[in-house]
């Protein structure tokens, strides 16, 4: 890998240690997944219970990722990851003990799997958002690819090792191995001295942080396209992983080792996809990569469902694994490079909510289909779902990787106020006056449409554009923010990419001075006495 773009993140000792520790943790997680999947296949009375193991793993990510993303953007990400890893260690120990005692039931196994999934949901947004804290922005695509490679490198050997462990010592030993595998990552996180920039504003309230993340994504069309495609890929693609125990047991008539061999083939293909990732992205645009991966994955699922041979099933899983990594890493990088640092954890969590939500729904759906019509029908139907997603993509193509500079603009200076405001004083109304010549109105309105999206995306409310009836050249942009501190936060969220619209509006403005900004506090009632005295010597609060 020397000289490759994938080598650059390894120049950071923190990345090297955390990545290596993740290898061990991923190995334990995959061995645990083999143990859980095969144990459910042996103790459950119906096929849909086997597929629910995958649902129990992915459902917590769908349910709790957004909350975890808000925490990742508001608190120390290192501390959050330590809490998540500790939680999963405790649950894994309990799972191993209950299995050794012989009291495990299908629903109890699902409950423990769900709790481990909760730890994953808490860990993932902080881990992925930390890539920008560990490596430079230009190395984020390589770091994301290496993270995928770390998982899939272990997927190539972990399931086979898991199959041997389960066959030789039982599922309890697989669960115990998983509990031990969390320790290296906990130690690496304790060593990592993550430097957080001092906060200039009070921490955003949890509910507001969640709504701000949702609002940002909703007002970002490119992010919505990536997230919706992630959901469709999760819905259709998860059928292979969810039904693989049934393929090994029913279609191939194999055991735990066969199941591990199939998962290992998927993992080997995923490693190949990770190694080809950079070259593929340099050769094709994002939409071509996504469509090709969807089609190839659908073909692999069809062959897997129709094949009754171990060698052919393993062969069909190689391209499926490659497409899995190419697609999910493409989506992940697209989200990271399209989102500024202040909201990247929440954007990633919403993407994961959609993708893992699709996986949870798909695991349940294809499990029901397999229970009723057999795993072959379920796999072929999942392939049809992926082809349908390709048809939809003809209308809604993916964006290319953002070339925008999403670093903070850093030009806002808090104005000196004459009124004695507090941080939570409000509501605040902002009015910006522009003088626009009639011939410039179409260009002004086009720029204002983009300005409206940026304002609302960054926290403004009740945005409106007014035109003076007596002086038609006078236009006034108005919007509200709940409090003065939210007004400051709104301006600090402005990125260098947003400055282009501001510069365009200033060029269209024909006044002798720059557009005038009025900052006003609303009165909800008319008090008998003024409760905001005027400062004698106004200073920046």
Image (spheres, rainbow, N blue to C red):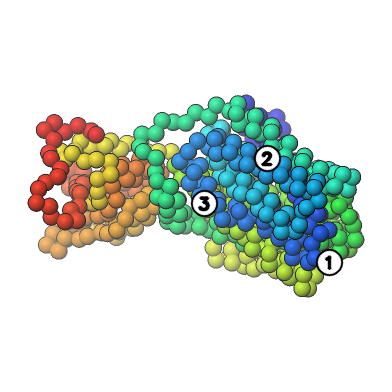
The earlier-in-sequence mark between 3 and 1 is 3
Split into 4 quadrants, where in the image is the C terminus? top left
Which is more toward the observer, 205 or 156? Answer: 205
Q: Is residue 59 left or right of residue 522?
A: right
Q: Quadrant of residue 7?
A: top right
Q: Which mark is residue 306?
A: 1
Residue drawn at x 39%, y 40% as measured from the top left:
203
Q: Residues within 10 Å of mark 3 (few under 14, many from 20)?
A: many
Q: Marks 3 and 1: which is nearer the front?
A: 3
Q: Disc 3 vs disc 1: Cβ atoms closer than 8 Å? A: no
Determine the secondary structure under disc 3. Answer: helix
Residue drawn at x 77%, y 73% as measured from the top left:
372
Q: Is residue 142 above or below residue 35?
A: above
Circle 2 is placed at which residue position? Answer: 89
Q: Disc 3 vs disc 2: Cβ atoms closer than 8 Å? A: no
Q: Is residue 306 left or right of residue 23?
A: right
Q: Which mark is residue 291?
A: none
Circle 3 is placed at which residue position? Answer: 66
Residue drawn at x 89%, y 55% as measured from the top left:
255
- The image shows residue 35 at horizontal and vertical percentages of 79, 49
Residue drawn at x 58%, y 55% as measured from the top left:
62
- The image shows residue 432 at horizontal and vertical percentages of 22, 50
Q: Marks 3 and 2: which is nearer the front?
A: 2
Which is more toward the observer, 348 or 179? Answer: 179
Which is more toward the observer, 473 or 467? Answer: 467
- The image shows residue 540 at horizontal and vertical percentages of 23, 33
Q: Is residue 503 left or right of residue 169?
A: left
Split into 4 quadrants, where in the image is the N terminus? top right
């Amino acid at each position: 890998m020397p000289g490759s773009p994938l080598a650059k993140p390894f120049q950071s000792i923190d990345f090297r240690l955390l990545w290596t520790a993740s290898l061990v943790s991923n190995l334990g997680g995959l061995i645990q997944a083999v143990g859980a999947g095969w144990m459910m296949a042996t103790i459950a009375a119906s096929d849909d219970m086997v597929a629910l193991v995958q649902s129990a793993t992915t459902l917590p990510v769908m349910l709790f990722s957004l909350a975890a993303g808000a925490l990742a953007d508001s608190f120390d990400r290192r501390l959050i990851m330590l809490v998540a890893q500790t939680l999963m260690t405790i649950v894994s120990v309990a799972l191993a003990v209950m299995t050794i005692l012989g009291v495990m039931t299908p629903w109890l196994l699902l409950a423990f799997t769900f709790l481990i999934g909760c730890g994953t949901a808490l860990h993932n947004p902080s881990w992925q958002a930390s890539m920008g804290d560990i490596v430079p922005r230009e190395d984020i695509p390589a770091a994301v690819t290496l993270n995928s490679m770390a998982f899939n490198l272990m997927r190539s050997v972990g399931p086979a090792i898991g199959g041997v462990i389960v066959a030789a010592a039982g599922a309890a030993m697989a669960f115990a191995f998983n509990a031990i595998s969390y320790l290296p990552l906990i130690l690496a996180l304790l060593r990592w001295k993550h430097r957080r920039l001092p906060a200039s504003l009070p921490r955003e309230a949890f509910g507001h942080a969640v709504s701000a993340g949702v609002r940002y994504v909703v007002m970002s069309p490119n992010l919505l396209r990536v997230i919706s495609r992630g959901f469709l890929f999760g819905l259709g693609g998860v059928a292979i992983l969810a039904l693989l125990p049934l393929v090994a047991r029913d279609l191939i008539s194999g055991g735990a080792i066969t199941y591990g061999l199939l998962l290992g083939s998927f993992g080997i293909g995923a490693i190949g996809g990770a190694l080809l990732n950079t070259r593929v992205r340099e050769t094709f645009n994002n939409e071509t990569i996504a469509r090709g991966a969807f089609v190839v994955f659908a073909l692999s699922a069809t062959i897997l469902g129709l094949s009754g041979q171990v060698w052919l099933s393993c062969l069909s899983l190689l391209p499926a694994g490659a497409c899995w990594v190419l697609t999910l890493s493409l989506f992940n990088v697209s989200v990271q490079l399209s989102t500024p640092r202040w909201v990247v954890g929440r954007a990633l969590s919403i993407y994961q909510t959609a993708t893992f939500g699709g996986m949870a729904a798909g695991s349940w759906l294809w499990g029901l289909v397999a229970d009723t019509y057999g795993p072959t029908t379920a796999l072929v139907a999942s392939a049809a779902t992926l082809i349908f997603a390709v048809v939809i993509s003809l209308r809604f193509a993916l964006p290319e990787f953002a070339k925008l500079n999403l670093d903070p603009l850093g030009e806002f200076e808090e104005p000196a106020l004459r009124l004695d405001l507090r941080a939570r004083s409000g509501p605040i109304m902002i009015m910006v006056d522009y003088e626009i010549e009639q011939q410039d109105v179409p260009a002004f309105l086009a720029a204002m449409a983009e300005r409206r999206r940026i304002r609302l995306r960054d926290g403004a409310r009740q945005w409106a554009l007014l035109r003076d009836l007596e002086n038609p050249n006078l236009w006034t942009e108005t919007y509200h923010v709940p409090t003065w501190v939210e007004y400051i936060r709104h301006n600090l969220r402005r990125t260098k990419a947003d400055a282009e619209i501001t510069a365009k509006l200033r060029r269209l403005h024909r006044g002798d001075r720059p557009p005038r900004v009025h900052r006003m506090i609303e009165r909800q009632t008319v008090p008998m006495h003024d409760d905001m005295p005027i400062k004698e010597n106004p200073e920046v609060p």
